Image: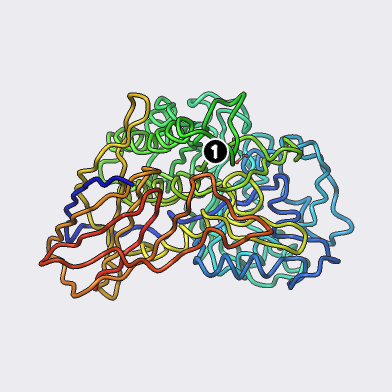
Amino acid sequence: KAQNNASLVVQGKSDHTISRHIYGHFSEHLGRCIYDGFWVDPSLNVPKKDRIRLDVVEALKKIHVPNLRWPGGCFADEYHWRDGIGPRDQRPKMVNTNWGGVTEDNSFGTHEFLELCELLQCEPYVSANVGSGTVEEMAKWVEYLNFDGVSPMSKLRKENGHETPWKVSFWGVGNESWGCGGNMTPAFYADQYRRYATYARNYAGAPLKKIASGANDFDYNWTETCMKQIPLHMLWGLTLHYYTVPGNWGKKGSATSFSEKEYFTTMKKCLAMDPLVTKHSAIMDKYDPEKKVSLVVDEWGIWTDVEPGTNPGFLYQQNSLRDALIAGSTLNIFNNHSDRVRMANLAQTVNVLQAIILTDKEKMLLTPTYHVFDLYKVHMDAEYLPILVNSPKYKVEGEEIPAVNVSASRDSSGAVHISFVNLNPSQKITVTTQLQDVNWKGVTGQVLTSAKVTDVNTFEQPNKIHIEKFAGAKKQGDNLIVELPAESVVVLELK
Ligand code: AHR
């Protein structure tokens, strides 16, 4: 493998931290994410609390999942929360019209979701129904979850076995309101948001962080209209959804079998997150120069064709080293925009889209993407350190992208972490890094790579791709020299 050089300058300070909520996840009532992923049949022979699968919980606790978004996605705008409380055998059933037309039995509802979040020690992020719901329905859900006094909803919550309120802060007001969430125009949605947000009350000790349903990828007009029409004090965050689709929505491409050209195109589309976030942020800056409102990328990840033979409505896809490189690059982009991007949610946690966990009955595996979250958890709530990158290009058929992307932070103990991604599948790259205002004596590291970008973990070989110790970094004078392997994610610790 030929060699190539990159140079970096890491600056030793900034004025903000990287919010841990950038490392959030998303669990929709879709395919086998909730049912069969988190919430399993009582007869399944795995450790469980009620019907919550505890091996999945343990794996997620290890990566310090900061928040979990639920119940959708498109499902959220057809979900009526009162169908999912009370005795399970009396809960009404519904059709999950968005995802395979299957019958939803509502056995996993509000109490079950909040129990899951308690087990995960993460913050819940609830998406309320604006598309087919009512202002009253959302207002009562907030009261049910957050009010500590005497009221009809707190009485009902207590009757259902939960004495104290959960005090949920993160509330999404609708989802994809430009599409499955009601096909609204941005001006109509902004007005609806104002109504819904007005009656979603801040009860004592439970102030809400209200999040408006934002743009689909390049729809800058949606962001502009929301920022113009919604008073800033009513808005904690505004969302953005962007998926990396290797082909097109008609033929998205295989998760496991792709050429180098397809790989290149996919990575180019992944890196488009950077200009996308930059442009949406610039529009937000016009109306909110102090950056009070967060950009919340609450759906992102690679979306391929489903695995052959699986239900097309269930969005089950395998997860390759390519997906790990997408995760590493996207999280680097979010870290580098952490002055505005303060929350993000990968779609979706278990068995759906760019899953971090796959299950097959009692078996469970951690995907390459999971390992990236494990490596990057060091950045959560750490001080952001700006980086100047001079990267060689990765070129295919006359097109080129930067081969290397990077982000860095300093944790509360003073240790500096730098995460590198080398997208070039056949060339290792030597990176020379100058560190300004960083005191360090030595470096250790970890790496995620494999022989091919198409490599995956399977139930037969669940550890084919795993984190290994990295010995390719050294201190030379004041500089850090790193030999980045081809197609790899490397995270270094300097202290
Ligand atoms: O994550 C799958 C779907 O993608 C979500 O339900 C929807 O919000 C988006 O279109």
Some atom of ligand 1 lies within 8 Å of the CB belonging to the residue at label 1? no
Horizontal side of residue 159 vs 182, given as left or right: right
Q: Can residue 109 be spotted in the picture?
A: no
Q: Amino acid at mark 1?
A: Arg
Q: Height in image: 378 above or below 306?
A: below
Q: Position of residue 434 (x, y in %)?
A: 14, 58
**Residue 227 image-quadrant placement:** top left
Give the camera-side residue of 445 and 16.
445
The location of residue 83, given as percent across then percent down, is 78, 50
Residue 446 located left or right of residue 2: right
Residue at point 61% right, 69% down? 118
Q: Position of residue 214 (x, y in %)?
A: 48, 36
Task: Please name whichever residue, 54 or 250, is drawn nearer the observer in this view of the structure.
Answer: 250
Q: Nearer the viewer, residue 459 or 48?
A: 459
Residue ID at (58%, 30%): 252
**Which residue: 58% across, 51% down?**
456
Quadrant of the image for the C terminus?
bottom left
- Residue 220 in view of the camera: yes
Asked whether 423 or 111 is in front, the reply is 423
| Residue drawn at x 85%, y 62% as measured from the top left | 87
Density class for disc 1 (Cα within 10 Å; few <14, some 14-19, many ≥20) is few
The image quarter in which residue 357 lies = bottom right
Looking at the image, residue 193 lies above or below residue 488: above
Residue 478 falls left or right of residue 411: left
Which image quarter has ligand 1?
Answer: top right
Residue lying farthest left? 477
- Judge whether 64 appears above or below 391 on screen: below
Residue beneath disc 1: 195
Question: What colour scheme governs how the chains and residues are painted in the rendered image of this protein?
Answer: rainbow
Q: What number of labels is visible?
A: 1
Disc 1 secondary structure class = helix
